[in-house]
Amino acid sequence: MFRRKDAKRCKDISGMNQILLDLKPHRYQGELYINQLMDVTELVKYIKEMKKKQSKVTYFHAFSTAIGKVIYNRPLLNRFISNRHVYEHNDVSLSFVMKINFDDKSEEIMVVMPIEKDDTLFTISDKIASKVASVRKQDDKGTGANDAIQVLGKLPNIIRVPIVGIFKFFARHGLLPKSLIKDNLYYSSMLLSDVGSLHCGGIYHNVTDFGTCSGIITIGEVKEEKVGKDTKYYCEFGITMDERIGDGFYFIKSIHLLQYILNNPKLLEEEASKKVEMRKDY
């Protein structure tokens, strides 16, 4: 058996969970769909105050930071299944796809952003803003997997298909070259999609067998709603998880933690890895 360099093998697997991997050997067979409407009223207030201070923090920056904190606090979310074995990533990372321009024919660039233990909302905001600016200026059209895809995708079927098959075999055993892992969105802790910028609600997106990403979260549009005399703000999240890395109880408690962080946005200013003490009523 090959030893992976990007993750450590998990030994604390029950017999029932191991049998589940045999019954559902493919990631798509374990897809668990969650649609969650989140109250983001306090976050909206927080972002508005930040804007008054000339801050460039956006909702996506805040959501990315919150999700990073949840993964650090809920480590099973950082696991993945490969070749019927359970692994935990050596680090925490988020991935997303960027368009160079907002039009149908614009080129898409894959981005993988590590979330360091000492990262905060402000460092993560700077990371994302810097990457977006670089790509939009076309100074950076992506590296690693982005370049490989451009070359491989133009090959004829008779050559491309067997090469992709070899890459998939290498991926299952953790032997894929670093050049094909760098900026590969399927090699991350969680894949994010900001569909709210397109005025869309949270949608469901499938996971894939390729790579090490066990979950995808789509972030919908922040919408205002009148509740009596009060004004509230909500955001719809579409979440797809590989149920083989956890269970429904674990995932729901993780969602509760995300809601708690969004209700207390000052927590985003703390280090990503700092333990969040959530109230028992969440």
Image (cartoon, rainbow, N blue to C red):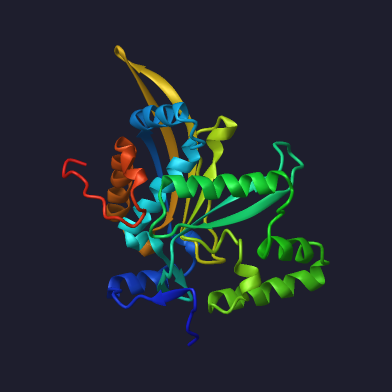
Count how many numbered circles sit on residues in the image: 0
Residue at image x 83%, y 67%? 156
Q: Position of residue 144 (x, y in %)?
A: 67, 65
Residue at image x 55%, y 47%? 128
User: Viewer-proximal residue, 70 or 237?
Assistant: 70
Among the 4 quarters of the image, the one containing residue 63: top left
User: Viewer-proximal residue, 26 or 66?
Assistant: 66
User: Viewer-proximal residue, 183 or 46?
Assistant: 46
Residue at image x 68%, y 57%? 142
Q: Is residue 91 above or below residue 108?
A: below
Q: Is residue 246 above or below residue 195?
A: below
Q: Is residue 4 above or below residue 271?
A: below
Going by the picture, which residue comes out furthest to the bottom?
1
Residue 151 as seen in the image, left or right of residue 201: right
Residue 43 as seen in the image, left or right of residue 221: left
Among the 4 quarters of the image, the one containing residue 36: top left
Residue at image x 35%, y 28%? 41
